[in-house]
Image: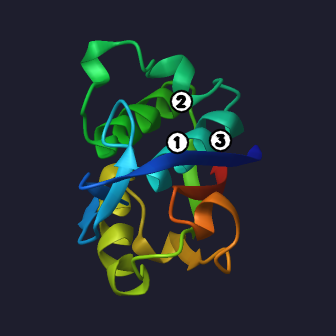
Amino acid sequence: MKIRVGFGFDVHQLKDQHPFVVGGVTLDHHKGAFGHSDADVLLHAICDALLGAANLRDIGFHFKNTDDRWKGISSLILLKETVKLLAEKGWRIGNIDAMLCLEAPKINPHIPAMQQNIADAIGISTEDISIKATTNEQMGFIGREEGVVSYAVCLIEK
């Protein structure tokens, strides 16, 4: 058996009166992440972790922000497409561990729904998907609610 790990990172600007989609869940908040797709920072970091582990470059390589096919698209679709790319190379996902860094809103009540969305998209158990959140203690662009960051690591097996 061959095992690899991957690391992913993503950041998006927050804008007033913009939808805030995280882990496929639309959060009720006065600001939301801005980007070419739905700007789901959590799923983008997970996609990058998976692609990196399989040595398949990064999310921007596969889903260019200049391509209208991906404009406004749900990042759950990008995640499903990422899983297909891994499967074509014979990889399967072992587990995912992800961290969100933002001041508000509180993420904890939404974690089970996010885990379920991710599990449904990639075909693994929610037991194999860890999602955590922290603040930036009101420091920097995260603390000022100007942006949101996510980190993810994964294990894949062949």
* Element marked by disc 2: helix
Residue 1 appears in view: no
Residue 66 picture location, percent across and down:
40, 13
Mark positioned earlier in the residue sequence (3 or 1): 1
What amino acid is found at the position of numbered circle 3 in the picture?
Lys
Q: Nearer the viewer, residue 39 or 95?
A: 39
> Of label 2 and label 1, which has the lower sequence position?
1
In this figure, which residue is indicated by the disc labeled 2?
59
Give the spatial CA distance, label 3 vs label 1. Answer: 18 Å
Q: Earlier in the sequence, mark 2 or mark 3?
A: 2
Above or below, 106 against 102 in this view is below
Contact (Cβ within 8 Å) of mark 2 with mark 1 = yes
Q: Identify which residue is drawn at 43% across, 22% down.
A: 63
Residue 147 appears in the figure? yes
Q: Position of residue 133 (x, y in %)?
A: 56, 76
* Residue bearing the label numbered 1: 47
Which residue occupies the foreground of this view, 6 or 14?
14
* Residue at disc 3, secondary structure: loop
In the visual, does 80 lie left or right of 138?
left
Structure colour scheme: rainbow
Are the residues tagged 2 and 3 within 8 Å (C-beta)? no
Q: CA distance from mark 2 to mark 3?
A: 21 Å
Judged by depth in the image, the label closer to the viewer, 2 or 3, is 2
Q: Amino acid at mark 1?
A: Cys
Mark 1: few, some, or many residues within 10 Å (few <14, many ≥20)? Answer: many
Query: How far apart in space, not on screen, are marks 2 and 1 (Cα)?
Result: 6 Å
- What is the x, y in percent for residue 60? 54, 24
